[in-house]
Image: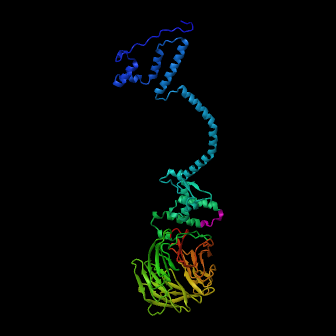
Amino acid sequence: MPANKPERKKVKSAPKTVLGDRSQKDETERDLEALVFGGDADDMWNKAGHELSDEEAAFDEDEVEVYDENENQKEADDQQVCWNVLNAQLFYFDSGPLATPSDQANEEEADEDAEDASGDEQIESDAETDDTEESEDEVDRLKRVQVDGYGYGRKPAWEDQDDFSLQVSLVDANRTKKLRETEDEDIISGVEYEQRLRRQFEKVNPVPSWATIPSLRQAKKRRSKAVEGSDSEYSDEEEQHSDFEEDDDVHMMRSTHGILDKRRTSRKLPQKDLSIIRLKNANQMNYSQSVISTVQFHPNSQVMMTAGLDKTLRLFQIDGKVNHKIQSVYFQDMPIHRAAFHPDGDHIVATGRRKYFYIYDVQSGSVDKSSGIWGREDRSLEQFSISPCGNYIAFLGRDGYIILISFKTKQWIANLKMNSSVHSVDWSADGKYIWGVGIDGEVYQWDVGQRACVHRWMDDGAFKPSVMAVSHNEDYYAVGSKSGVVNVYGRDVLRTDLFNPTPLKALGNLTTRVNEIKFNHDSQLMGISSNRKKDQFRLVHLPSLTVFSNWPTAATPLSYVSSFDFSPRSGYLAIGNDKGRVLLYRLNHYPSA
């Protein structure tokens, strides 16, 4: 044999295996047979999970002959690596996969890549940190708003968590643009959108005192007082009176004592600014086809009547939002110049430039025509006034006569005679006295029961008076003239020894003939109007005898004011004009309509 050729050694040959010979099967085959065909279960469970260690042990016990020591060692190393790779791929443990050399190398490379990319990620993270923190602060603020109960003092019964992730655009629709705080603002969160909708709704429909928790009301007053300081327009006495009344409203249902008396007690009306909001037109469901000659509220409910020269009388249910039309009555042969509710609210008297008049029964819908007044030949009965007691109707006749008829019988009762033609009349609160003013400026006071004049006094200036009105508490007496001046008198006019009383105030805010003067229910407001010139309407603060300066403004669409009225509790103010519209306003000082 050549010298450089390694000497071959004998290798033990493996014994021949005969198929089906169980004695020649190795342990692995016997275990597999036991698993498939059944065997010792306890022995199988003891061996489960030790397959790798058994194979490694079996591999170490194999006797292999090599050509020499170097090749034998190299072959053994390659074989060991092969076994390790196969075992790692074929078996796993419940505690996790075994780490192979290739996996460790991949992990080291991943760590190096992560370290290289950490710098870039840090830069991006720093850029997004400010936005993230700002977003988190906004979410936290909105969550605090929800926890605080949106200002109502208690947590809501249900919350939608999607509101925090919802994004709303304020410029997509025209009706949401008014919710923006700045002109460039666009996207806001869902919770912020809800808050702004709440604020917008409360601007149009302020929260009434009975719906406000007393603790929140006191906190709001403290904040308002801290902001306004000594410039607050309410005095301490007024605040105490307001607190007393509002607390009574909150606890009203806890007692049955004195409810009506408390309702009659009213707060003092602020002098400087009038809190007023325009609502939907009162007759928007059915506009008049002519000038509105009469606007009046029902004495006991939120129903308003309109009448005009289109010969139609209309009734509306006033809610400030829809103002549904209830019904309408068409008088075929009479344009309506004046109409008025009877104090019981079940009848409406309608008149025109005719010698007859109509009485409409609201409940039954029937119309009763009165053919005229027996013994009188007046061609027109368009001007009249119903007594607060509901027993009399006073028509303004010719030659200075005031014609009294009974509402029940529609028959003539008496004539009250003045020295000049009568232009306007008004009643005392109980209907026992009636006042009338004529063209000569002299005011007459009659006792209706005695049918006698008990007092006369002269209007200051006496320049063709056109209208007269008496407040509900009979503390104020107002006389309007052709020049637009309105003289307001106190109770001194009732003194029988005083013929030339001095007015408390002469209001010269109107410049044309005054055609209507009305007082509200608590005699703190007086409205005056003229239909001879556009936008001639003013509201007067009676305790101070000053006209409100903040309303109406130049942008208020009054047009030619033909008639107006206050609701029974002064919550609403309705103004009719020449366009057939009735503008509706909410007086926020008065909690109920």
Viewer can see residue 441: yes
Foreground of the two, 442 or 38: 38
In the image, residue 546 lies at what x, y percent?
62, 75
Q: Is residue 531 magenta?
A: no
Q: Quadrant of residue 25?
A: top left
Q: Position of residue 495 (x, y in %)?
A: 58, 84
In the depicted structure, whether residue 145 falls above or below residue 461? above
Residue 447, horizontal then vertical, whole percent: 50, 87
In-front residue for pair 190/227:
190
Q: Is residue 388 visible?
A: no
Q: Nearer the viewer, residue 14 or 407?
A: 14
Q: Which residues are magenta?
A: 229-237
- Image mark count: 0
| Residue that extends furthest to the front in the rendered view of this protein | 2
- Residue 236 within the magenta-colored segment of the rendering: yes
From the viewer's perspective, tell me whether residue 265 is left or right of residue 228. left
- Tell me where residue 165 appears, x and y as whole percent: 53, 50
Q: Specify the quadrant of the image occupied by residue 501.
A: bottom right
Coloration mode = rainbow
From this view, report whether residue 241 is shown above or below residue 576: above
Q: Is residue 39 left or right of residue 247?
A: left
Identify the residue at image location x=64%, y=62%: 228
Residue at x 42% of width, y 87% of height: 370
